[in-house]
Image (cartoon, helix red, strand yellow):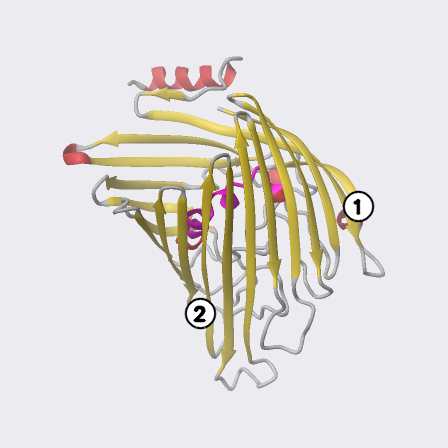
Amino acid sequence: MNKPTLALAVSAALTSPAAFADVEVGPFALYGTLHSALEVISVDNVNATIAKTKDSQARLADQTSKLGFKIKHDLADGMFALAQVESRVYLGNNGDNTDNKAELGSRNTFAGIGSKRAGVLRLGRYDNAFKLALKSATPTLYGNLNDAVNDYGSKQILNRLGARQGDMIAYESPSLGGFTANVSYNLGKDATSAATDLMPQLALGMGYKVGALTLGLGYTSLNNASWDLSKSSGFAAKNNPGDQKLDAVQFGGEYKFGKYSVGAVYERTSSSLSGSTAVPATASFDRTQDVYGLTGGYQDGPLTVQLRFATANDVKGTTVTDTGARQIGVAVAYQLHKNLAAVGSLTSVKNDKNATFTSASGFALDKGNSMTQLALGLAVSF
């Protein structure tokens, strides 16, 4: 297809009133979701003072809207080439300036090659294998209906070392007897902390699906990094002098029966720092934290309901107490049209006095503060 014809097809997809359907031109496809919600947030403040931006409020918050372009070319002998450019789009600014930070290719953006027999190799920006292990273990937990009820991510209770990362080499195996595997290696230039040193991350994931049962196992390790879990609930890895370790393991499963599903996941994050004259005994640490997630689902025609629960135990290996939290939520989606859904959720985050966990819609909570978050919105897909 020549360039003018392709440009005309994309232009028509963006301007036509009937554009909310899959738009494919040969091997090229345009897709996306625009999802925003009114969030009403009630904060339980235990501090003497609190910034107005962190106090009870109502806001219009984006729920991970995105726009993507992808292409897949069939090659000889069952092989194929693929590429994708997926970008974040903001409807409402979530109470900050994130709407000014949307960049082309900010989400999964890669070039790849693969086959049905050998699997797929991707180079670029992609979800690491530890994050994808959660999808293998509990598809319902991974498939949250909006950000306001979501409980996994760098500042959430679950899967804090799972991330979308640049500088990524990622391999996904084909299904062999129900087993699948993911391996990813982030070369370290895209560290999600402010560290100036390279912190490469290796992640491994394995999934198994048979009938209505899915199981998943994940492991990840960061080099040149450590994280004192008792000082920061959210991901805060740094490169420190001395012997350091930072890794996490998770496993879980989900079972579907009729219109219902139930799932559970367990995760342990561990980090230590020691063994250097530059690290005094008072700065050394050896920390672990156990977290758990449960989910229940129901789907009947256009109606989808999710119940979610996540809990973080106190950090072990420290005299600092009250570092745990609990999050419980219910979300309901009703498909008004194949490309339009109304989504509502009610979420409660209860932090102990030394924890700062929050939901994935990005509302920041001070240490020890808790919140109730009601979100009502619309999601339009194309």
Bin the neighbour count of mark 2 within 10 Å (Cα to Cα): few under 14, some 14-19, many 20 and up. many
Q: Nearer the viewer, mark 2 or mark 1?
A: 1
Cα distance between the residues tagged 2 and 1: 39 Å
Which x, y percent locates residue 294? 56, 51
304 relative to 263, above or below: above
Q: In which quadrant of the rendered view does residue 365 lie? A: bottom right
Left or right side of 49 for 117: left
Asked whether residue 134 is drawn in magenta, I would say: yes
Badge number at residue 275:
none
Query: In the image, what residue occupies the spot 66% across and 56% down?
Result: 326
Q: Which residue is mark 1?
A: 56
**Please, what is the three-letter code of the amino acid marked with disc 1?**
Ser
Compare residues 57 and 260 and report the one nearer the observer: 260
What residue does disc 2 label?
A: 224
Residue 276 at what x, y percent from top left?
A: 49, 84
What segment is highlighted magenta in the picture?
Answer: 132-148
- The image position of residue 108, as x and y in percent, is 43, 41
The residue most toward the top is 17
Q: Please state which amino acid type lies under the numbered disc 2.
A: Asn
Chief SS of the magenta region: helix
